[in-house]
Amino acid sequence: MTAVKELLRAESDGTLSFGDYTLRAKTKKDNYEFEGDIYKVKTFAEITKLEKNGMFVYESVPGSAVEHFVESEREVSFTVSAPGDVQFTLELEPESEYEVFIDGASAGKMNTNLSGKLSVSVELSADKDAQVKVVKC
């Protein structure tokens, strides 16, 4: 997988792709309308962050590329790539339990904190991506 050179784009399957971890300087794209919501992405080698209607959605350290990001009331799924291991944080429902799947295998159940944040680390390399699915229990 490669970086999303447009920084933020809608896919034909109704999902979003965003992030370019190859950038040396922080770059952003905002006021991107998708399905009635306004998105903003900030991305470069050190961090990638997505906001929807001014609210936190996704953040990774270091920066990453995310393809086919889709969220519903009970599930978030996407494919993530980066030049190496990455930690991402999602904004979900506060104080709730979720099961995390990486490449189809369960990585276990995790609880969100009071603000609804859930952080997950994924082992990656430049030639490998990971399919992530987070499902509310």
Image: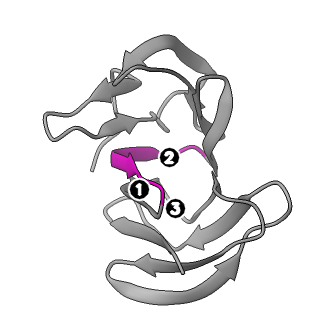
Residue under the point 47% across and 73% down: 135
Residue under the point 34% across and 37% down: 17
Image quarter hosting the C terminus: bottom right
Q: Secondary structure at mark 3?
A: loop
Vertical position of residue 70 compared to residue 128: above or below? above
Tell me which secondary structure the magenta stretch mostly adopts: strand
Name the residue carrying label 3.
84
Name the residue carrying label 1.
80
Check whether the beta carbons of the residues at disc 1 and disc 2 lie within 8 A of each other: yes
The percent position of residue 38, horizontal first and vertical second, equals: 50, 18
- Seen from the viewer's position, the closer of residues 53 and 82 is 53
Residue 64 - label: 2
Residue under the point 57% across and 31% down: 44
Check whether the beta carbons of the residues at disc 3 and disc 1 lie within 8 A of each other: no
Mark 1 / mark 2, whichever is N-terminal = 2
How many angstroms separate mark 2 from mark 3 (CA)?
9 Å
The percent position of residue 80, horizontal first and vertical second, equals: 41, 56
The amino acid on which the numbered mark 2 sits, given as a three-letter code, is Ser
Residue 45, picture quadrant:
top right
- Seen from the viewer's position, the closer of residues 52 and 119 is 52
Give the residues in magenta: 63-73
